[in-house]
Amino acid sequence: MKEQIDRREFIKQSVALGVTTMAGLTSVPKVLFGGYHPAGIDISIVNGKDFFTSTVKAVEQLGGIGKFVWKKSKVGLLINSPWDKPGTYTNPDVALAILKMCLDAGAKEIYSIEGASSGYWKRSKLYQQFEKEIDAIKSNSDKTAADIPKGKLLKEAKISKVLLECDVFINIPIVKNHEGTHFTANLKNMMGACAGSTNRFFHQGSGKGGIFSYYADPDFLSQCIADVNLLRKPELCVVDATEFVTTNGPGGPGEIKQAHKVVAGTNPVSVDAYCATLLGLNPGDVSMIRFASEHGLGEIDMKKLNLKEV
Amino acid sequence: MKNILCKIFPALCLIAAVFSAAPAQIQKAGIASILPGSGEPGGWHQIDSTQIFAGEDLYKFIDGGADIYFEYGFRQVISAEYKNIKDISIKLEIYEMTDDAAACGIYSINASPQGKKVKVGNEATLNEYYLVFWKDKFLTFISSDDTTGETLEGILALAENIDMKLDVSGKKPEICKLLQQQDLVVNKYVRGLLGLSSIYDFDTKNIFGVREGAVGIYRNHRVFLFKYDSEKDAEEWYNKAREVIKNSGRYLKFQEQAKLYTMFDQKESQFCVTHLGNLVIVVMADRGSNISALYDSILSPLKIYINR
């Protein structure tokens, strides 16, 4: 018997099982059938100081991890982990909760797309409790060139192979200030999956600065971010909005807002639109969110989104 | 031969400028000589090897956050980590900018108004978990995950140690002196769109063509002074910005008089924009403020300066 099925084969089998699935007789993740609206909620928000528990609750409000991760699936986690100042990286308790839920759901392989270091996990007070689970995380830094035919400025990107090939992609950013784009969360976190050369193009590709100057072009950067998000939409987004810098982002140190929220959803654009409001921004004024919405990647009008906050 | 000289001359000038601008002692020993040495001060000892990133390598150090440093003028950064006997860690970063105005500017963008002013370098702010200060052309960040009094004392001691090693103070940019000092809460210095938009986001494009400016933040209003090479340039950018603002959905109730236009933003802040000499001046006031009176009080001393 075949131990592992790939994503394509899984979808084929899922379609074949469609009728029974719709009748609720199997445990096939419904998200793969397209247009799935988990529990009727677009954005799940949980408040509390126990960030591990908040994360679990935020996913439960969307229908539970079983809606997104299935037995023997290959999961890619994109965690914003490279920074080291308070409020600049995804709280490891949030990432640990996702990791634990994925393992409990029977995921066969879990990859850290950006390769979170052991130093990152050790910042969690739960590190020792979940050392075995952390050890189970695989890393693969291989990048592959991918065409983006619908990209307005970015037509090709070198991006993580795992991100493109995994069955389930879970984006786990932190919301925070960014001095160029004023905001970063799901959409910009995709740069963590890109090769340095691609990211360099995002920052300098407009060529407006000339040879000896580096005047960034935030709209160019924002459009590239929107474009790269055409490559793969996450199955699940879980944003750390517990404690984050509101100035001097993305690296900090900066002023910290303690919102104590974990925000989850299936649409990165809509979740980012909500998260922008946590920084006092109008989603439509954040270029990357507006450009991604113009690509048809998600709704940014809060009035049209169903939020559940506990 | 002449062609070759023409090509390499700008590069030689740049290299000469790079080396001539550095204080002799630091230039000789390198930026690492500013770091507090091992075992000093107060039992905080350096661990791991230091890391230095110069020029474009800053992207490797703060990929995503490097652009604003380039906007101000960046040369190199050194980072190091210190620990005490309790294994508490303090992280230190010293940015060498191209000149003292660049260091002052990036400090002004990063210093929190909620922070406590401390006597280190030219200006320093101590916050809940970090200290930032500038002196000469160096900007220093010292931070820790630990916020106990003992660690904050360690942060301060490391800052004072660096301060002592820098002989030259450096000066605030001249344009900052044009801001009225009375009731000034915060003074910021900008060199482009990224710095400016961190204070107020006029547009996603640099509609005023800002290359140098000072921003004064007062209790109920803000004053933006943008400096240009000539009076003609100032007028040109004043006009260019007017066209964008007039047609932008960001602003409401646009009105124009001779050498002045006014508008409101979506949050109902009021704006007056004018140009005077080689300056474009923007006065931004909270809803309900008497912006006309403010405008007159701000313009009068500037007219004296321009006509000097």
Image (spheres, rainbow, N blue to C red):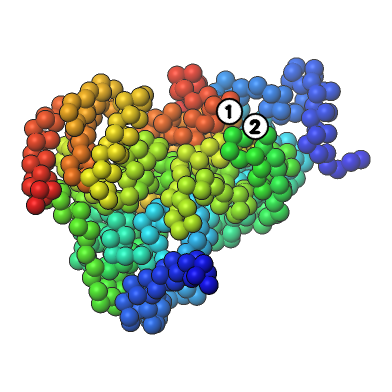
Q: Residue at x 47, y 22 (%)?
A: A301
- Mark nearest the camera among 1 and 2 is 2
* Left or right of residue A49: residue A66: right
Q: Amino acid at mark 2?
A: Lys
Question: Is the residue B17 above or below the residue B207 in the image?
Answer: below
Return the residue at label 2. Answer: A150
Labelled disc at residue B179: none
Return the residue at label 1. Answer: A295
The spot of residue B65 in percent (x, y) is 45, 52
Decide: marks 1, 2 in contact (CB < 8 A)? Answer: yes
Q: Residue at x 44, y 66 (%)?
A: B10
Q: Residue at x 76, y 21 (%)?
A: A21
Alpha carbon of mark 1 to alpha carbon of mark 2: how far?
A: 8 Å
B165 or B277, nearer to the observer: B277
SS under mark 1: loop
The spot of residue A11 in percent (x, y) is 79, 30
The spot of residue A213 in percent (x, y) is 44, 55
SS under mark 2: loop
Name which quarter of the figure residue A258 lies in.
top left
